Image (cartoon, rainbow, N blue to C red):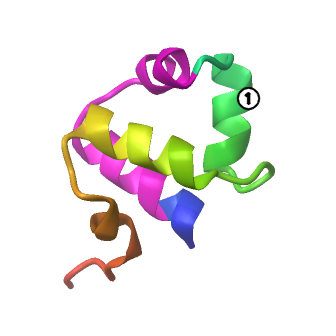
């Protein structure tokens, strides 16, 4: 799912949730809820997250190579 891929990629880039939360203008707790799938991630938020992580948005929709 999208929220799981976002978390996975963020962790692989060693970026703290606080960095992304600050970029989105929300609390770490609110961002954490997005990564756990309890709140939706909007298209605009996804674009900002991709920019912070320096990855294309399409990467969030690709299956991880095994």
Instruction: Determine the image quadrant of residue 10.
Output: top left
Which residue is depicted at the point 33% across and 46% down? 50
Q: Main secondary structure of the magenta part?
A: helix
* Relative image position of residue 39 (x, y in whole percent): 78, 49
Crowd tier of the residue under label 1, counting other residues whose Cα lies within 10 Å: few below 14, some 14–19, many 20 or above: few
Picture quarter with the N terminus: bottom right
Q: Is residue 14 left or right of residue 60?
A: left
Residue 62 in the image: above or below residue 36: below
- In-front residue for pair 18/51: 51
* Relative image position of residue 18 (x, y in whole percent): 49, 17
**Is-magenta flag for residue 25?**
no
- In-front residue for pair 36/46: 46
Picture quarter with the C terminus: bottom left
* Location of mark 1 (residue): 30
* Relative image position of residue 24 (x, y in whole percent): 55, 25
- Check the image and name the residue furthest to the right: 38
Which residue is depicted at the point 68% across and 16% down? 27
Q: Is residue 8 left or right of residue 46?
A: left
Residue 7 in the image: above or below residue 57: above
Helix, strand or loop for disc 1: helix
**Is-magenta flag for residue 19?**
yes
Q: Is residue 41 left or right of residue 14?
A: right
Q: Is residue 46 left or right of residue 3?
A: left
Residue 19 in the image: above or below residue 61: above
Instruction: Determine the image quadrant of residue 20.
Output: top left
- Check the image and name the residue furthest to the front: 44
Which residue is depicted at the point 67% across and 45% down? 34
Magenta segment: 5-24
* Relative image position of residue 25 (x, y in whole percent): 60, 17
Number of labels in the image equals: 1
Which residue is depicted at the point 23% across and 58% down? 56
């Amino acid at each position: 799912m999208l929220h799981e891929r976002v978390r996975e990629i963020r962790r692989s880039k060693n970026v703290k949730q606080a960095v992304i939360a600050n970029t989105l203008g929300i609390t770490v707790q609110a961002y954490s809820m997005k990564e756990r799938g309890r709140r939706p991630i909007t298209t605009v938020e996804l674009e900002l997250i991709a920019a912070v992580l320096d990855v294309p948005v399409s990467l969030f929709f690709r299956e991880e190579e095994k």
